[in-house]
Image (tube, rainbow, N blue to C red):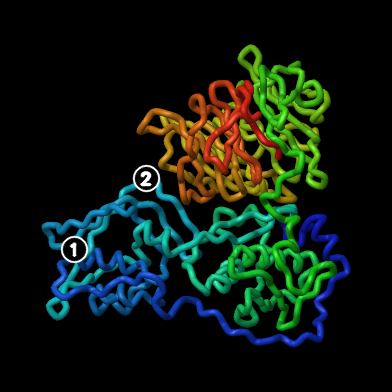
Amino acid sequence: MTRRGAVLGAVLLALVSGCSTVPTSTPVVQITQTPPRADSPVGIEPLSPETGATPEEVVRGFLDAAASTVRGHPVAREHLAPEPRGSWSDDAGITLLGADYATVTTDAGTVRVTGELVGTIDQRGGFTVDGQEVYSREFRLEQVDGEWRISDPPDGLLMLEPDFERLYERRDLYFLDPTGQRFVPDPRYLITGEAQPTVLVERLLAGPSAVLAAGVRNELEGAALGSTVTVSAQAVTVDLTGVADATPTRLAGLAAQLVWTLGQLPSVRSVEVLVDGDPLTLDGVPAVQTVDTWTALDPDAAPVDAVGHYLVEGALWTATDAPAPAPGPAGTGVYGLSSAAVATDPSTGELTQMVGVTQRDGQATLLTGPYDGDLTPVLPSGSLTVPTVAPARQEFWVVRDGSTVVRVAGGGPPQAVNAVTLPGLGRATALQLSPDGVRAAVVVEDGQRRSLHVGTVVRSDDGPVALRDWREVAPALGQVVDVAWRTSGSLLVLAGDAGEERTVPYLVGVDGWDLSPVPTAGLPSQATQVAAAPERPPLVSAGGTIWEWQVAGGTWVTLVRGQQPQPGTEPFYPG
């Protein structure tokens, strides 16, 4: 992680200049404390074991009883023998099984549970997708007063996926990118109910997930709750301690983190931050804040001029209402581009710099220059992936020869990115940076399998940029073709459908949760490339033409409604 106290970004500097933490005369009103978990049944509660239940019925009842909102899972404990009933921990994480599982009584008298292992939820609410393994565990049972009870339950909850989807919701914790200019979402899964504000604050204070920690800033590091989180009339009050000596920049950052994280809850409209019981005051920031107070940090804000682009016979075109060549030499086709990327100015949103890849005589060359000006060769190679942009930095990344990640910033010379573990995954065929610039999605080829992985970009002031902490996020997809970022927390993936031998677009969360196919209605043939960006309609190239996803109609349409498809390949959005 970069050093503490780095510049939070122009927007925060403008807001906090001259700010202070001098308390106002407004008294602090004590509001009812939110319970950490429901004490009474909510929704559909599981049943106690029936008299005379068989061992298999007891084990199935134990799994069903995981789907409870009552603190301590008392019904689940009723399925246990006396000794484990008191020692079993229900808060050691969750193991998720598919809905179709089997129970079999073995010759040894145990009950074997077998099913699809969907993934796990750790104690901090983070999801890890499983690598397509089968879950199998044998439960031992003993008779207690003539009734079968489990004697060796695993710690944590063993829960069926449909029950988890019914009871838990995805909520993002928000941390800052190294520049302090954008938020980075860190997905967590919380049980539904009134406890969510308290839990979200506690999770923020605990910090980012292990795979993300090195790439983000947490201005709440070292802070603690001075009193309970209180909720009243859609407002949340958070009283912090341990930050009285924090700089104005850090105070602005931690306030923004709290407001964005809590503001995603439907029940929360505003947040008041206290420091040691006194209201936090920041120049230019109201005492009671909303998400609108910190819109400049939106990780999914789209630049005004960031319209889609694509290539037509080596020329750069814009996917506007009236598609046309891009300005400058690149739009005339003089370079014969095979792929390209365009960067925007973070402050104005204007298209400023671009790179393009040319292919000649079996060699690839990266060109760079102004968006509407001449391009200069900067990097020859045997092969180069489609370039991608690091937002807020006007920095372009490519993978050279399938294994070496290279970045080109500000018209300077190419610099290697420390990605020493990438070659171990396979040969990289695609790399795309997230809209917040802190994550990278990569498609790697290993033998007959092409898989999707997400890594973390780690920047420091005294060392090279690194790309590390890889995790596979869609192991069910073994023939990934292309990938793009739909939002900072979700991906649009183009992958082969093994069952029907076709290529299909999918949506999936950055952590691998909620993999779902996107309809292909309207496409003339299978898609070969995909492009996406926050607040923009996804684009694909299919049959050498460009198509746009119409969310309202649930179908793919031509760029110009009612007209013939526009020829083109390699669509992308500026970053």
Residue placed at 15% from the left, 67% from the top? Answer: 54
Query: Sequence order check: which comes first, mark 1 or mark 2?
Result: 1
Identify the amino acid type marked 1.
Answer: Glu
Give the residue at mark 2: 132
Q: Which of 319 and 389 lies nearest the eye of the viewer?
A: 319
Identify the amino acid type marked 2.
Answer: Gln
Q: What is the x, y in percent for residue 262?
A: 62, 67
| Left or right of 333 in this view: 37 | left
Q: How many marks do you count on the picture?
A: 2
Q: Which of 503 and 413 lies nearest the eye of the viewer?
A: 503
| Left or right of 385 in this view: 517 | left
SS class, disc 1:
helix
Q: What is the x, y in percent for residue 389?
A: 69, 38
Q: For the N terminus, which image quadrant?
A: bottom right
Up-down relation of residue 155 to residue 438 (above or below): below
Residue placed at 27% from the left, 76% from the top? Answer: 78
Q: Which of 242 and 253 lies nearest the eye of the viewer?
A: 253
Residue placed at 75% from the left, 55% from the top? Answer: 296
Give the residue at mark 1: 56
Quadrant of residue 369 in the image? top right
Up-down relation of residue 399 to residue 148 (above or below): above
Distance between the alpha carbons at the discs numbered 1 and 2: 25 Å
Instruction: Name the residue at the right extreme.
Output: 18
Circles 1 and 2: CB atoms closer than 8 Å:
no
Instruction: Name the residue at the top extreme.
Output: 361
| Left or right of 403 in this view: 96 | left
